Image (spheres, grey):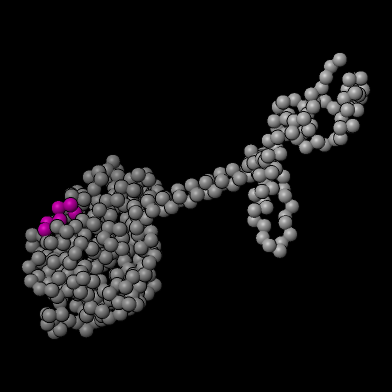
Amino acid sequence: MSTSTPPENHPDHGGTPSVSDEQWAQLVRQAEAGGAGAPKEPSARARMVTARLRELDQQAARAQGSGRRWGRKPKQVEPWQPDGWRTGPAWQERNGGARKRRRLAGTLGFLAVMGVLVVAMRPSLVTDHLPGDGGSPDADTTRLLSETAPPTAAPTREAPDRPTLDEPFRGSPALRWADGAQGIELPAAKAAGGMSQDEVADALSKTRRLLVEANLNPATLRGERPRAVLQLLDPHAEGAREQLESSLSKPTENNDPVMLVSRFDPAEAEVLGDVVKVRGRMTFKAGEPGSVEVDADYSFVYALRKAGGDDVARTIVRRRLTAVLYDAERWDATRGKLALTSYESNVGNTECDTHDGFLHPWFDSDNHAAARGDELIDPYDRSEWPDQKECGTVTRT
């Protein structure tokens, strides 16, 4: 006959009995007889798990009861629960949100870096749209948009501030003009006059270079021989190159180099700083078969300091010219060279009755009142070409 060992909660094991001795004896007799409903002894592992769970429940009860305060109803003790571990939907939701945040942060960071790089390479994208003082609290130094058509009126008058060494363009409309060669923008090239798109682009580029060398080159402005201008002109073409060479050697009233190039006598004046203000436009059209004509109309504003002093003045030079590039296979022309079919100039603030190959600006310390004419001229008015035959008086510089 088999015997059965009492469970841990039996009195023999020191536990608290859950059934009476009579009930336990009856259950034992049923087990020996093979009757139904006889208790089965739990395994050692089950007993260990049961004991561990009971211990954890007791620890949870003590922890929840430790915060009990007087006069309050004790809270219901919650049984111990294991920590969650990768509980599918919530875990995926948390990680999905993190991924979105990381992706958004990465995109914003990339855009910020690109913005900084663009501004660093081209700060004018920001500075051109910011107002500046220009030497006057109310001055607007926002750069003007490019001139794409003839203006219909003169620019508005600025505050009547005089130029200074530190702010040579103060009080001038040129304060908002482009600096130097940036103001000579080229139109998009396309085939015209039997010339290919590349040939038209070459004509535009060479005309731009001619304007730069004649009006912005520091050596030319100092009165040196404008070699680059001469090299761009076709020696086979009648007119411009020959006249320029002769005027440089022996200037006259009707043949003065300042009709094509800007030159100042260094003994009288020098360009102040390295900025010349520029505004104008360039267009092109088909010329005679096998040629393209480029029309240019630009104004150049020079800030000048009197030699040996601190007097500052401005001289404004407006130039109009038509440059032609001919197909060397159809015309008696030098390949890649320009011919000038017309050119003219108008200068504000210069001694117009002096023809010695230089421009002569007037400074406040000079007394030239008697030499000025009666005709009033606004040198900044680009809406029309002044029909000036005699010396006049500029209304502003």
Range of the magenta residues? Answer: 224-229
Relative to 319, is 12 on the left or the right? right
Q: Quadrant of the C terminus?
A: bottom left
Q: Quadrant of the N terminus?
A: top right
* Numbered marks: total: 0
- Residue 173's x, y, as percent? 31, 72
From this view, report whether residue 338 is shown above or below residue 173.
above
Which residue is at a point 67% across and 41% down the rendered structure image?
56
From this view, report whether residue 188 is shown above or below residue 357.
above
Taking depth in this image into account, of 375 and 98 the one nearest to the observer is 98
Residue 352 in view here: no
- Residue 284's x, y, as percent? 35, 55
Is 244 magenta? The answer is no
Which residue is at a point 48% across and 47% down the rendered structure image?
106
Q: Quick one: which residue is furthest to the top in this view?
A: 1
Residue 201 in view here: yes
Is 226 magenta? The answer is yes
Taking depth in this image into account, of 141 and 98 the one nearest to the observer is 98
- Residue 317's x, y, as percent? 23, 68
Relative to 158, is 308 on the left or the right? left
Taking depth in this image into account, of 143 and 357 the one nearest to the observer is 143
From this view, report whether residue 185 is shown above or below residue 307.
above
Which residue is at a point 64% across and 41% down the rendered structure image?
83
From this view, report whether residue 66 is shown above or below residue 145.
above
- Residue 204's x, y, as percent? 31, 52
Relative to 29, is 198 on the left or the right? left
Taking depth in this image into account, of 266 and 242 the one nearest to the observer is 266
For residue 241, which quarter of the picture?
A: bottom left
For residue 143, which quarter of the picture?
A: bottom left
Which residue is at a point 31% across and 60% down the rendered structure image?
183
